[in-house]
Structures are given as structure tokens and as C-alpha cells.
Image: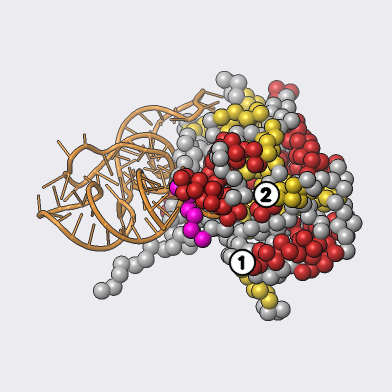
Amino acid sequence: MTDGIANDRLEKLQALRAAGQDPFPARVTRGQPIAELLSDFAAKHGQTATVAGRLGQIRDFGKLRFAHVADRTGSLQVGFQRDSMPAFWPNRRLVEGNDLVSITGKLGTTQKGEPTLWAEEVTLASKSLRPAPEKWHGLQDQEQRYRMRYVDLFANPEVRQSFALRSRIVREVRAYFDSLDYLEVETPILQPIFGGASARPFVTHHNALDMQLYLRIAPELYLKRLIVGGMERVYEIGRVFRNEGISTRHNPEFTMLESYEAWADYRDIMARVEGLFAHLVERVLAGNGTVAFREKQYDLKPPFQKARYLDLFAQQNPGVDWFDHPSCLARARQLGLKTDGIEPHKLANDVFEATVEDTLQGPIFVHDYPVAISPLAKRMADDPRVTERFELFVAGMELGNAFSELNDPIDQQQRFEEQVAHKDDETPGEVDLDYVTALEFGMPPAGGLGIGIDRLCMLLTGSTSIRDVVLFPLLRRQEATPPPAES
RNA sequence: GGGGGCGUAGCUCAGCCGGUAGAGCAGCGGCCUUUUAAGCCGUAGGUCGCAGGUUCGAUCCCUGCCGCCCUCACCA
């Protein structure tokens, strides 16, 4: 357990104990937030104050030492003078950089005007047995930053800021839906039948019921049951799980916002999305709607562009008919896409993704998706081949997906049966009959929305990798180095 | 899964044409009461990711493996 712990720090720990000091006391004098102390600092000159936090590197002048103490709100210099703290002085070296401390003293300044707490009493709050990363560069190694996020967070202040911003984004998303009289709800993560998206699920098992369960790939079908139940406006922000590849835009567990609103259609939901972005620009970006992402600028202030799915398809694939398999097949081959064993509608959409998605700098609403790739969306009245559905793209990245919800139980059952007939790893092996039953009781016309919160955070924080907005991204388990092979 | 890159001290990084390892920070000892990437003097710290191979000799070249990063595929 002590493997890798610096010996000199263990020695100091022992020395502290020998001197009768607990290196891990249950409580110390709590500090005042440093940011508060720093505001109108001049007026506080001479006052007694306590700060508690992590000690930075010590600058030692013999009979005088300086160091900064950082808490969640900021950092403040502390000065230690031999002549004003004779009791502490002989043990001063037992408290060192990266230790957690509580320090009481008088507020003042140095000759250069730096706000400083002149220490009178120092209490070790918790001994750090490991040194801090390099003071100037912080922790740079990506692997260690993800594996040891706790170090990344205290060593790299901008990481803390990024996650504080994420917290603010989620809070404001809630505030927006709350203001529209939506109810925040929680629906099952453990589901006997997975649905609401197309993705491979994680499989688990409940012992007492001896039942196979899936971690949800989407909350959709449960939220729409609530619409049937008359809740009318609901949203959920929660983790979903997809057993698929990992990339800069994909983590196996990620946070999804889904909202459903009775009596709304997909046009209304488009307005909701624009309203949400207007709210976020105002409350998170302080009115400045321009964000930098992957070296480009994006203006997130609504209104957003709109384009029909099939029009975009036709622009990038002249002469190709989305609904005509041979022509899509030829185009797919020309693009070098994988074509073996791919369902026709899937292939057509692959052509769309290969040729159109990268051009969608946006923000742009792509709307009216073909029904074959939209099993839960309502058909257009004047063209049953397409649905009332849109996706929001920014920087070639899919941020959201919305549609007028299919509420015809007979159509829904047929589409489910179609899916089951062509079952693959990404579709459930059975029809969700209970969901169909719910629709049979009558679901009002409704508009639904899904937004990937992590991707939204990437955009608003300028992060190029989803791992920079997920506190603990999934990494391969680090195995102990295997012993040399026996012969 | 394919392609590319990386892995050297606790941290940040050098390391030439193959000749057996370096700096800064952190640590330890010393000097210093106004520094804030403090400074100066000294000192200690290494399974060069792991395992093989080539070679008189491998951190360096080759092969395999492990991990991470980028990218493509996958992900409606």
C-alpha cells in the first residue's frame, strides 16, 4: 500500500506523530472562502482570518517563508515568520507543499503589495504522502490525467473550471425546462427490454428475480408512458449506457437529456431547442453566443439554419435516390463504404453520414428523416416515407434528436415487429408490448427531444474530447505488469 | 478491428550516427526576512513500459505484447 510513497514524507508523518500531532485530525478550524477574503481586501488589513486548503510550493528565506494556499474559491499567499510563531517554527518542515492545512493569522500585504495572511497558527489538516506534480506545467500526461483525475483537478485549475462550467450548464438546462412547467422525473435504468434508440446494451442480471436486465440505452419509452399517464411535460437528465466503441465523441456511459411535451409537434420542439440555446447563451456564456471549437467559431444564438434531410442528401449525392437501393449501393461503393450485409435504409443513411455530416457546421436543424431510420417518429401526413423529425448539428457533431412522437399503437407495433424480424445486436429480441399497450390507452400528440449533455458541454467548453467533460472516463483497466514468462 | 504517434527520475522534458543516462521542478543538507516559476552552493534519485531478437555492445535497430493519444471503421 505504501508502494510509491515518498519516504521522506512518511518520515515527516512519523515525526509529527512523535511530536504529538495528529496528521489526520477529524476537524480543524474551517477557513473563510479565499475569494471573499480577497474582495475589498484593503479594508480587512489587520483583521484576523483563517484559511483552509492545499498548500502550494514553499518559498523559503530562512527566517521567512511564503506559500500559497488554495481552496475551491481561489488562492491566497501565506507568510510564515520565525519571530511571530516560535512554537511552530522548529516543526515548520514537517508541513510541506501539497499538505492540507488550516492557517490563522492577520491579513496584510507584503512590500510588493501582495495580499498575504501572516500566519500565527498552523494546523495540519491532512498530510499528503505524495508530492504535487510539477508546479508550472501541472499534470500533462493524458493517461494519468484521466486515471488520476483527483490529481488533475487540484494540479490544473482550468480542469476544475471546465467541470464547474458543466455543472452550471446542467443547472441551466434544468432551469429552462422547469420554467416551462416541465416535471423532472427518474425512470428505470435497469430495463427488461431495451429500446428508444439503436445501440448494443450492457447486459446484467437480477438474482432475486432471476431476471436478465439491460442498462438503458435511452429513457424514451418510459418517458412517453408518462405522457400517456397525463404528466404532459416531463424531462429526465440521466446516464445512458451503450456497449460500443470509445472515441473523442463517445463514452460507453454518457448523460442524456430527454424531454417530452404533450400537444407539441416537432416544430414546437425546434422552438424549444432554440429557446434552450438562447437561455444557455444568456446564462452560461453571459450573452456572448460565439464559441470556439476545433479552431472554428460557432454562433449559438438562435435562430438556427434549417435544411431537409433529403435535400441535403441530394445536394451531396446528385442522381442518387435515397429510396432506391441499387443507386445507393453504387454510391456507397464509390465512396468506399462497407456494403456487405447492410440493410438498405441503413446503407442509404451511411451515405448521408459519409457525405453530409461533415458539411454541417451549423448550428443547423436537419429535418424530415426517412421513416425507415426513425422507428419512433410520426410520419408526415403528405409523404408517408418521411417523418416529422429533426436533428441538431454543430461542428459536424450530432447534438440532439427530436420528433413528433409516434402515438399510433398499430403502426408502432408493426415497426417494432419489423425490427424484431431483422434483429441484430442493436435491437431487442422482443416487441415491447407493454409500451404498445400504453399507446393503446391513448397518447396525446407530443413532441420529444434528446440532447447529449456531454457533447453540449464539449461545445460550450471548447473541449475536443468527451473525456475532458467526463470526470472519470472509462479506460482499460491497468493490469499489474505480468511476471516474466516461465519456460 | 485498421493506420499513425507516444511511453526515459515523483512531475515536465532532453538524449546526436548503437558505445551503457541528463536538465528543470519536487526531495534532502547549507545560506538568506519580502518572495510569488524566488535565488545561490551541495546532494540524492533510473527495471529508459514489458518480453524476445540482431549486435562485441541496445534507451536508440527489429519482432511481439501492454497502456495512452490521434485518426479511420463502428456508433440511426
- Point 58% across, 65% down: residue: A425
All told, the count of numbered labels is: 2
- Point 74% across, 67% down: residue: A432
Does the magenta portion include A118? no
User: Which of label 2 and label 1 is nearer to you?
Assistant: 2
Q: Nearer the viewer, residue A344 or A191?
A: A344
* Residue annotated with mark 2: A370
Element under label 2?
loop
Residue A227 showing in the rendered view: yes
* Chain ID of residue with mark 2: A
Percent coordinates x, y for residue A471 in the rendering: 60, 49
Would you say B76 lies left or right of A263 here? Answer: left
Q: Nearer the viewer, residue A265 or A112?
A: A265
* Residue annotated with mark 1: A423
Percent coordinates x, y for residue A114 in the rendering: 60, 24
Percent coordinates x, y for residue A306 in the rendering: 70, 34
Q: Does residue A364 sit above or below A413 in this rendering?
A: above
Quote the CA–CA distance across marks 2 and 1: 20 Å
- Point 47% across, 45% down: residue: A335
Element under label 1?
loop
**Boundaries of the magenta span:** A336-341
